[in-house]
Image (tube, helix red, strand yellow):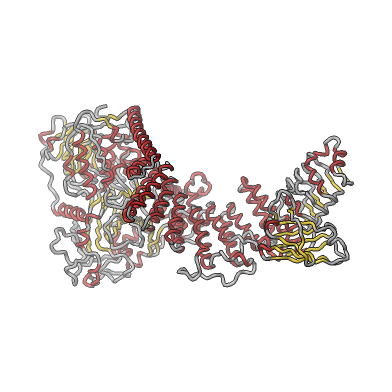
Amino acid sequence: MAADNLPSEFDVVILGTGLTESVLAAACSRVGQKVLHLDRRNYYAGNWASFTFNSLLSWIQEYKAQQEMPSTESDQAWVGKIEEGEDMLPLSSVDSSIINLEVFSYASFPKDSEAANEEPSGSSVEPQHSDSPGDRTQGAAEPPKQETEPSEACKNRQMPETQQSNQSEESDKQEQPITRPAEAPIELNKRITYAKLLKEGRRFNIDLVSKLLYSRGSLVDLLIKSNVSRYAEFKNVNRILICRDGRVKQVPCSRADVFGSKQLNVVEKRMLMKFLTFCLDFEQHPEEFQGFSEKPFWEFLKSQKLTENLQHFVLHSISMADQEILTEEGLKATQHFLQCLGRYGNTPFLFPLYGLGEIPQCFCRMCAVFGGIYCLRHSVQCLVVDKESGKCKAVIDTHGQRISCNHFVVEDSYIREEQRTKTSHRQISRAVVITDRSVLSYESDQQVLVCGRVRECTCTCAPSTDLVHLTCPASGSAREDLAPVISNLFHVPNRSEETEKPLALWVMYFNMRDTSGLDSSCYSLPSNVHVCTGPDASLGCDYSIKLAESMFNQLLPDEEFCPPAPNPEDIIYDGDGAPGEGASFEETNHAERSGPEGEGQPQENGQPSSESSEPAESTDSVAPETNTESKVQISPTEE
Amino acid sequence: MHGRVKVKSTAQQEEEKRKEREKKLKVYLSARDAVFSKKSNGVLDEEALQLTQQLLSSNPDFATLWNFRREILLHLETVKEEEEMQKLYELELLFTESCLKVNPKSYGSWHHRGWVSSRLPRPDWPRELSLCDRCLSVDERNFHCWDYRRFVVKASGVPVSQELRFTDRLIGSNFSNYSSWHYRSTLLPLLQPGTPSPCRKPAHVSPTASPQTHGHRVCEEQLLKEYELVQNAFFTDPNDQSAWFYYRWLLGRAEREEMISCVYVSREGERVTVAFSKLVNAPAEGLVLVLDGQPQQVEWRSVHPLFRHSPVWLCELPPGSISDINNEHNLTVHWTEKHTHRDCALYTGRLESWCRDSATDQELFRSELSIEKTSVLQSELQSCGQLLELEPQNKWCLLTTILLMRALDPLGHERETLAHFQTLKEVDPMRSSYYSDLCSKFMIENTILKMEYAEVRVFSLSDKNLSTLCHLDQLLLVTHINLSSNQLLKLPPQFAMLHCLKVLEADNNAIENLEGLYQLPKLEDVSLRNNHISKLSTLEPLVSCPKLIRLDLRGNPITKTANIQAELAQLLPSVTDLLI
């Protein structure tokens, strides 16, 4: 598409379509700001995206290509656009927020039964091999070297709570050294094949960040308040699991769970209910935790006559807290968890029906409805800074067009190292596992698993497979951090046979940069350039939403943040022009359904248009293929 | 500001809505008129079916239209093939389903659905059950749906065990659900021993159980599971009453055997008094009195004209039939309806005689909570004690503990029971009167038991905080009663059952009503000091007590009335010893 078509003046230019950027775009557009929203990727949501299996493989390919061939800085097309009294501030053209990507495939290939782990012939992608800079190319065919020791070390170093909480991961792992894949059992053939994964690939929605929505968290509140909820559908998380003593158990968190739990005796049930009831309004009873305000939460739990079992449940699965969290914070976290219960179901969590990547797209849609303009595969090369005021006057896009703006909002990964005052980053370790069944058999498909600080949630996926996400703050590479957990929870095929555990079919590890701790003091940028940090390591989305709101208040201090959008039928259109825009969003729907990489290239649709656009009234067509009974529609009426 | 989205004003929206509504109303009214004209002309065609459908889908509570619809369908049944009707009725089911989506509590829609289901040539019951499931998952207390579900279960013969699993599921998702617990209580007795879930009947009936009561009981193994389930519920949330009520049901409520518990004959009064184990209407029960082998023509009357049903009945014998003290007489009272009888012999030289079961033999007052084996009750009492330790203020737990203690050993636990009642009144002041009455009842029961053990006819219940009187039928033979220093407000009509009473002491109460002092043939001495008797009319029932000679009314408001002495003398001429 011809970039020259873009208008050359905007109020706000936003680069990156992650959650914070998208919310901000919607909020600005909603109050009448002219918004240009760009992303250099060819899909929405950036590191918040959800992929089908096939598009995830392409994503991996792209990652690999970028690692092999770091793109050179583009030609200095902007030179002629800079005027007297202006400075130029280049942005990074390389995304380095993902590192240490490694992929292992254990799914069998039907044509090749005696060597089940060889590469698929004729497959267009090479999913089981993925190179990362540190020369750790490890297909499943090669036994990973020194698997046990480094991860052991890092576990002990970084995750001390696993030991204190009586988890037997350590010992399990040591007893199972990785064996040669040649010993892989033959009956793999009966299991799900790699070809089947590819064939069913479109039924997966694999999130890059694994997050859930607290049903009374700020994201749900925002979805309701802004009416953005109409663009998406949600499912309840059915249960929360915990791994303790090497066994996966269900966490009794609601009243019905406690009642039905077989692991607790009646007295434990009473004690747990009593404690949880107290947590609901703990502020009213300060005398109960008076002596503990400076002490860690677990000490308080110990003092409450809770059995060890209960202490573990409360600390790790209900407050979802760190081992060292202080009592009051722990109580607050527990309270928040409990307040979220029962709003939409028996657990406090909701999950977007087609993956977390839906949510940023919903806000983008809202932005477009109010006139925002979208261009994917379109980035900004550099900022034009006024020497006198030190402010960013304009940006020069990848096509060399100069676009003036009052504010420029950018995702962290576009910032060059030179503009950073703080160069060290935290990392999030992530693993995505496709397995053949749930870690604890049950008829549901939505669950959260918490063990230590490693969190897993299994989500929408193809029939007879299960998807498990693992997340933890990184201490080493993702594989070092998480492989021990995976080998504890799953049966990895080239090891000794263990049928009672689910079979890991496909595993992907990567580290994602966690910039959530950074603020404006960490960048040396003009005052009207605002950096959105990426996803954090926590389970909820509250951090990113709060960030978007505070940035909005900085940008437009006098405006309301995401007031309720009017009903489409109540919008008055002056003249023509509206319908075309609506059609473009129809296509975005398709993209949502088939994953951001679906055919049709919806990202090309950012037709410049100053008119307000009509939202496509097809919310029900967004989700045509799943059972309607278990869906949750968030709306203000459910309050 | 530029670029703002323009939105219609509220007034514009209102106006649009109003127009929409008007249009709808017009369509509705014209359709209604069309249907009514068809109905009055007896046109039962498919167009009428169409029209009623249109109307009912916007207003499913229009009963006349449902009726008309059924008329049409019945008519169509006579002219159409079964296959066609099957299709038509299936459409009806779809239609009612859509109505229920609009209003899940529409009487008309549910009723019509039931009717259609019963007319359907090939009903699809599983489908109906799943509809109920969906409906109950939205609102687990939708009683329309519960009713319909019971109908479907009955019609399709769903096995009891499957229904039990259904209640398991509902209770599992939310145990604050009376409907499910109650449904469970109706299902459990139907579980037959030897059916898939291996249940034995109790091998022996516990000795405390009366023989008639175990027929509808649940087998032991299942009962233990139920105890576990319900304990899980009340330990999880002890303030949820549905579980406690179910627990009370589980612990059972023994019904007393129907029998004649006492026959009393007085030579002097030439009167026979009969007490039953429950309320009866004697004249209708085929009661026959046989005196010395001769059936007697007698007229049975209850102790007080207020009672048509009473546990105590009496009759006058023909004058002179037993008055000679030198004769011995044998009486038998036959209760032909129940094929039972009781004999009583009046020996020479005796003025009165009786024959009865003692309250101790009958385990009378254990009936509040059941017939379960003592060991079961004992272990239940232990778990309640455990909960009470954790939740000392929980009223449900306190009350259940009291009941269990009563069932196990009423006298042995008397002190603890009283303490628990005290706590109950404090934690639940709204129901303190109920607890007082219940406590009074238990105190009276205990006193009766003590009296029985002592084999005396003197009943003393002074200073026990009694707020009410009960079990008076058990006091038929009592001659002296002391009710002083309680909180009684009245002597209720049941008091007239104390047919042998000679001396009544009821000082220091708040009595203002003496209805129960009615036709007490032997009453001689009544002491009512410091009560609230204020009117002469209050004392009128005493007129019917022929032997009253002493009456103490000191400390009552009535004593302040002018000329009271003379009026009392006129009202109660037999009283020679009047204390005012």
* Residue under the point 59% across and 66% down: B214
User: Where does the image place residue A236, in percent across and percent down from the top left?
Assistant: 36, 51
Q: Is residue A174 left or right of residue A106?
A: right
Q: Which residue is more in the foreground, B445 or A49?
A: B445
Q: Which residue is more in the foreground, A60 or B244?
A: B244
Q: Quadrant of residue B368?
A: bottom right
Image quarter where the C terminus of chain B lies is top right
- For the question of whether residue B232 can be seen, the reply is yes
Image quarter where the N terminus of chain B lies is top left
User: Where does the image place residue B577, in percent across and percent down from the top left?
Assistant: 89, 46
User: Where does the image place residue A437, in percent across and percent down from the top left?
Assistant: 31, 62
Q: Which residue is more in the foreground, B469 or B401?
A: B469
Q: Quadrant of residue A180?
A: bottom left
- For the question of whether residue A390 can be seen, the reply is no
Please tell me whether residue B295 is drawn above or below residue A303 in the rendered image. Answer: below
Q: Is residue A289 left or right of residue B572?
A: left
Please tell me whether residue B64 is drawn above or below residue B411 in the rendered image. Answer: above
Q: Which residue is more in the foreground, A620 or A172?
A: A620
User: Where does the image place residue A203, in percent across and percent down from the top left?
Assistant: 24, 55
Q: Is residue B4 left or right of residue B142?
A: left
* Residue under the point 50% across and 67% down: B192
Q: Quadrant of residue B298?
A: bottom right
* Residue under the point 40% across and 44% down: B68
Q: Is residue B189 left or right of residue B75?
A: right
From this viewpoint, which residue is outermost toward the right?
Answer: B576
How many numbered tags mark residues here?
Answer: 0
